[in-house]
């Protein structure tokens, strides 16, 4: 019996500190690999934008040469800046920025107001209205796009900035997002302000909005990205350079018989910059909003 | 003082009258809208032509409307729904029958200069003609074709015969024999790239694979009875597509996931490429002298090649058809536009343009491609159901290439096409054509 006890293998003794270090190394390596996978297409895009031969770019794709440029040049950036000698791409970039800023700012106001009313307003049939808003969310944009084109054309808004902003300012998703955020704030906050004689608008503006930075940041980023990446809608409703955004302008590089990868890559890099800035500026609140939503369910 | 005021009143009156007159003059100008697609080079070329046209015709303003190539059909549909069709528009040739049948286009013969009309190649006329009234509804400077591009070194290594003209194109036995030999040759990963990488969103499969099947005695639809069942799912079509499926199964064809650059990518892994005339520029830039241009193989008794490209039409709703026709004539004769087209190795659709294009002239590297236009080119079915025909056919080919049963996939496609024709009451008067 004692033999038997003695013959049992001794438990594998791994020092605790080593185990933690090992785990950390594995974690770091995994994170590094994931980051590499996420970043590599962007890096490839940047590298390709510095090559001046579109055929070379295509030939390099699929090999490690796609991640290397022996003679970097800014000629693609110069070419898109000077295309037609009218700085057209600068214009498209400005157009996109104007559309983004107006859409996001007005979208924040309208969606947050609607969300606030649905959360705290005394409106009759609020629950039905909320259910309708949520139901609207499941209707894909593509299914209403043609009737919307006709509506906008009859309103005489074709080829304007307004046509690219108005239809997308109010969104069921963002109304619901604000509603959910406001509804989670304590009821006492509203009641106390009401007892102090504050109007509903005052409560919204002075109490709830300052507390909603994470929601505002999330909606700003999501709306901003959505507006920035709009392609089909502006393609259908813009005719000239006047209000054409950069997303449609980049499509010119993808022609019938040839694709100008060099200039398309450079324009894509330029197109990414404002969205990156927007994300970096708001990422702290954006992340906290998502973490908050996850914790609160 | 009174005189001073009177003078001021008079001059104001004169100024306002002058303003009103000039406004009236400005209103007298006709405006034509021109919708087109194209890459930045073409966009600039069209824009420059419009400027020159306006200088030559001060009474006409041209407004260019750009639509991205990939979203052109959506843009066109939006313009139709909003009743905002432009005066002049570019359209993909095989869609012409659908547009004419739908009443979107008008005949262009009375509107375009006669010398330009007389300059059209047979293939160009075919792509712009509506089969019901045999009238011309569209015209282009260019046309298109597909050829085989060969890696000279690889072909020499297997002792392949290089055809010099369309008449001595490879037979099926030769072609498949070379594919097999190439599959065993060192350095060759895939014997042929059929550009599956273009996917089924583009016209490629119908445009490029259709002629191979037609060469084997198959067709997408019976062009007299306008019925797909019995033709697209016939034994000849099943056999032809099973043949192509075997190439894929044997690993001879570059897969969709490998993109469209395997012919000239590092190591040149694909020995042959069945590509459009436009592919020459990018392939020759990378391969230099190591490239040969070969006519499409004769799979059955006859050689068949595709044709058709983006051409120009005048909308039926145009309020200024004369000005639109004037613009089209101006565009097609414009020297700078032609010069730009030459730099893009554009395939000639006008005889005078062919004479100016050394690439396609006798002895030129793409002479064989141009020879195909007169000897083997067959247009895609000129029928209003074409959008359904091409979509159903492409889906069937995709299924078959991914291992599906050829008979089953083609029968399903034929039924879908016939259903569309039936749903539209046979697209009269196409139903009376037999």
Image (cartoon, rainbow, N blue to C red):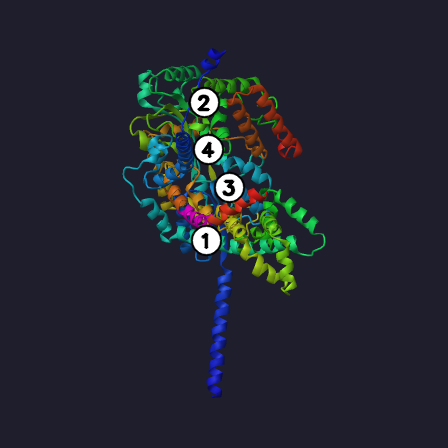
Same chain? Circles 4 and 1: no
User: Would you place residue B413 above or below residue B40 in this image?
Assistant: above
Task: List the residue tagged with mark 1.
Answer: A97
Please determine if labels 3 and 1 lie on a single subunit. Answer: no
Q: Are marks 3 and 1 in contact (CB under 8 Å)?
A: no
B422 in the magenta segment: no
The residue lying toward the viewer, choosing from A150 and B333, is: A150
Disc 4 or disc 2, which is closer to the eye?
2
Contact between marks 4 and 1 (CB within 8 A): the answer is no
Query: Dot 1: within a 10 Å radius of its alpha carbon, few (fewer than 14), some, or many (20 or more) residues?
Result: some
Residue extending furthest bottom? B1
* Residue B204, position as x, y percentages in the image: 48, 31
Q: Residues within 10 Å of mark 3 (few under 14, many from 20)?
A: some
- Residue B111 appears in the figure: no
Which segment is the magenta one?
A270-283
Q: Chain of mark 2?
A: B
Q: Secondary structure at mark 2?
A: loop
Residue at 62% from the left image edge and 42% from the top image edge: A138
């Amino acid at each position: 019996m004692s033999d038997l006890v003695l013959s049992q293998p001794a438990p594998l003794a791994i020092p605790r500190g080593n185990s933690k270090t090992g785990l950390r190394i594995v974690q770091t390596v995994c994170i590094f690999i994931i980051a590499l996978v996420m970043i590599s297409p962007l890096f490839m895009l940047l590298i390709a934008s510095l090559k001046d031969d579109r055929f070379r770019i295509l030939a390099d794709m699929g090999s490690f040469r796609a991640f290397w440029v022996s003679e970097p040049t800014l000629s693609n950036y110069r070419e898109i800046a000077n295309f037609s000698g009218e700085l057209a791409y600068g214009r498209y970039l400005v157009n996109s920025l104007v559309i983004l800023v107006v859409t996001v700012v007005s979208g924040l106001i309208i969606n947050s107001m609607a969300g606030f009313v649905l959360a705290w307003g005394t409106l009759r049939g609020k629950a039905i209205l909320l259910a309708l808003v949520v139901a609207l969310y499941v209707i894909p944009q593509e299914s209403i796009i043609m009737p919307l084109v006709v509506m906008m054309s009859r309103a005489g808004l074709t080829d304007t900035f307004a046509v690219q902003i108005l239809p997308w300012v109010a969104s069921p998703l963002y109304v619901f997002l604000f509603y959910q955020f406001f509804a989670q704030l304590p009821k006492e906050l509203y009641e106390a302000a009401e007892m102090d004689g504050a109007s509903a608008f005052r409560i919204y503006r002075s109490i709830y909005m300052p507390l909603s930075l994470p929601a505002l940041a999330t909606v700003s980023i999501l709306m901003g990205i959505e507006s920035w990446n709009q392609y089909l809608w502006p393609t259908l409703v813009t005719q000239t350079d006047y209000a054409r955004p950069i997303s449609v302008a980049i499509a010119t590089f993808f022609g019938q018989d040839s694709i100008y990868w060099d200039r398309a890559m450079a324009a894509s890099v330029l197109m990414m910059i404002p969205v990156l800035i927007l994300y970096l500026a708001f990422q702290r609140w954006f992340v906290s909003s998502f973490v908050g939503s996850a914790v609160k369910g | 003082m009174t005189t001073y005021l009177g003078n001021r009143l008079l001059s104001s009156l004169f100024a306002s009258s002058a303003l009103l007159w000039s406004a009236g003059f400005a209103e007298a100008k006709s405006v034509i809208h021109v919708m087109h697609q194209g890459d930045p080079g073409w966009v600039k070329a069209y824009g420059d032509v419009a400027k020159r046209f306006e200088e030559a015709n001060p009474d006409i303003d041209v407004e260019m409307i750009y639509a991205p190539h990939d979203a052109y059909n959506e843009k066109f549909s939006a313009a139709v729904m909003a009743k905002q069709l432009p005066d002049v528009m570019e359209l993909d040739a095989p869609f012409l029958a659908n547009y004419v049948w739908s009443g979107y286009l008008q005949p262009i013969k009375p509107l375009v200069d006669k010398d330009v009309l007389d300059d059209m190649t047979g293939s160009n006329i075919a792509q712009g003609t509506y089969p019901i009234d045999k009238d011309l509804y569209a015209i282009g400077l260019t046309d298109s074709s597909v050829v085989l591009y060969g890696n000279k070194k690889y072909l020499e290594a297997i002792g392949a015969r290089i055809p010099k003209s369309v008449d001595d194109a490879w037979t099926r036995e030769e072609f498949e024999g070379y594919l097999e030999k190439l599959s065993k040759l060192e350095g060759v990963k895939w014997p042929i790239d059929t550009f599956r990488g273009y996917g089924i969103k583009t016209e490629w499969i119908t445009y490029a694979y259709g002629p191979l099947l037609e060469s084997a005695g198959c067709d997408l639809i019976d062009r007299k009875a306008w019925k797909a069942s019995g033709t697209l799912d016939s034994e000849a079509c099943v056999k032809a597509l099973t043949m192509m499926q075997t190439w894929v199964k044997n690993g001879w064809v570059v897969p969709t996931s490998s993109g469209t650059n395997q012919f000239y990518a590092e190591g040149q892994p694909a020995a042959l490429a069945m590509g459009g005339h436009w592919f020459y520029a990018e392939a020759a830039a990378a391969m230099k002298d190591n490239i040969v241009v070969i006519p499409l193989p004769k799979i059955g008794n006859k050689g068949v090649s595709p044709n058709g490209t983006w051409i120009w039409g005048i909308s039926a709703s145009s309020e200024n058809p004369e000005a639109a026709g004037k613009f089209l004539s101006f565009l097609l004769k414009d020297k700078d536009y032609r010069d730009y087209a030459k730099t893009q190795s554009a395939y000639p659709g006008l005889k005078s343009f062919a004479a100016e294009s050394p690439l396609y002239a006798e002895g030129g590297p793409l002479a064989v491609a141009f020879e195909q236009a007169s000897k083997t080119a067959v247009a895609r079915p000129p029928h209003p159901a074409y959008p359904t025909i091409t979509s159903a056919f492409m889906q069937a080919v995709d299924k078959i290439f991914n291992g599906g049963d050829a008979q089953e996939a083609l029968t399903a496609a034929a039924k879908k096409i016939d259903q569309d024709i039936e749903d539209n009451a046979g697209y009269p008067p196409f139903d009376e054509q037999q």
